[in-house]
Amino acid sequence: MNGFEKILRSRGQEPSSTKTPESGGRSVTLSGGQPQVGFILINASSTVAEMFYFHSIRNAKLQTKKGTEYLSFAHEGTVVTMTGRRLIQVLQAMRGCTLVELRELGQAAATVSDDEPVITALRISNIGVADAIATRAEEMLLDLAPFAAPAGK
């Protein structure tokens, strides 16, 4: 093992499979200690999958209100808020850069063991200028229309 491999493996072994797990009841996928650059967040209907880089995450916050856990963070003009249980494990994996994938399970969360972290609801919101850009980009993707300046400009 050369010096680079030794450094990369110093926090764990490389995962034996890089295949993205199916939504079969797993809400949180960890790397087994292998440092990651970022993670993917997938909504319950699998219609949105978004990449988040650890070095760009800001203001990560875990709170419990009326018995419900909330985890939120900001990333490059995006705010993510999720509810679930055992979200401290998600926050710790974010801090340690060992998170690979987060998947909102919605109603399927009831089938997950109580000792595993689970995301029951998820909201991804764009803020500020990034919101206008993202909204316009989404419109362009949906109707494949060329970019048009707003009327009167």
Image (spheres, helix red, strand yellow):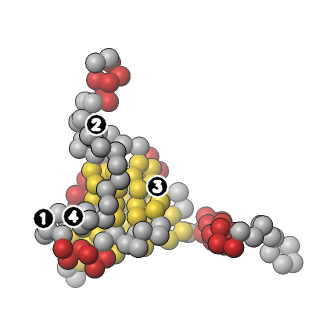
Alpha-carbon span between mark 3 and mark 1: 26 Å
Alpha-carbon span between mark 1 and mark 4: 7 Å
Q: CB of mark 2 within 8 Å of CB of mark 4? A: no
Alpha-carbon span between mark 3 and mark 4: 20 Å
Residue 56 drawn at (x, y percent):
47, 50
- The answer to whether residue 95 shows anywhere in this view is no
- Secondary structure of the residue carrying numbered label 3: strand
Task: From the viewer's side, name the closer residue of 37 and 20.
Answer: 20
User: For the residue marked with disc 2, what is the amino acid?
Assistant: Glu
Which circle, 2 or 4, is nearer the viewer?
2
Alpha-carbon span between mark 2 and mark 4: 22 Å
User: For the residue marked with disc 3, what is the amino acid?
Assistant: Met
User: For the residue marked with disc 1, what is the amino acid?
Assistant: Asp
> Which residue in the structure is indicated by mark 4?
117
Q: Earlier along the polypeptide chain: callout 3 or callout 2?
A: 2
> Which residue in the structure is indicated by mark 3?
51
Residue 18 drawn at (x, y percent):
34, 45
| Mark 4 burial class by Cα count in 10 Å: few <14, some 14-19, many 20+ | many
Which residue is most to the right? Answer: 152
Q: Earlier along the polypeptide chain: callout 2 or callout 4?
A: 2
Give the residue drawn at x 46%, y 55%.
Answer: 51
Residue 83 horizontal side relative to residue 126, left or right: left
Q: Image height check: is 41 above or below 83?
A: above
Image mark for residue 115? 1
Alpha-carbon span between mark 1 and mark 2: 25 Å
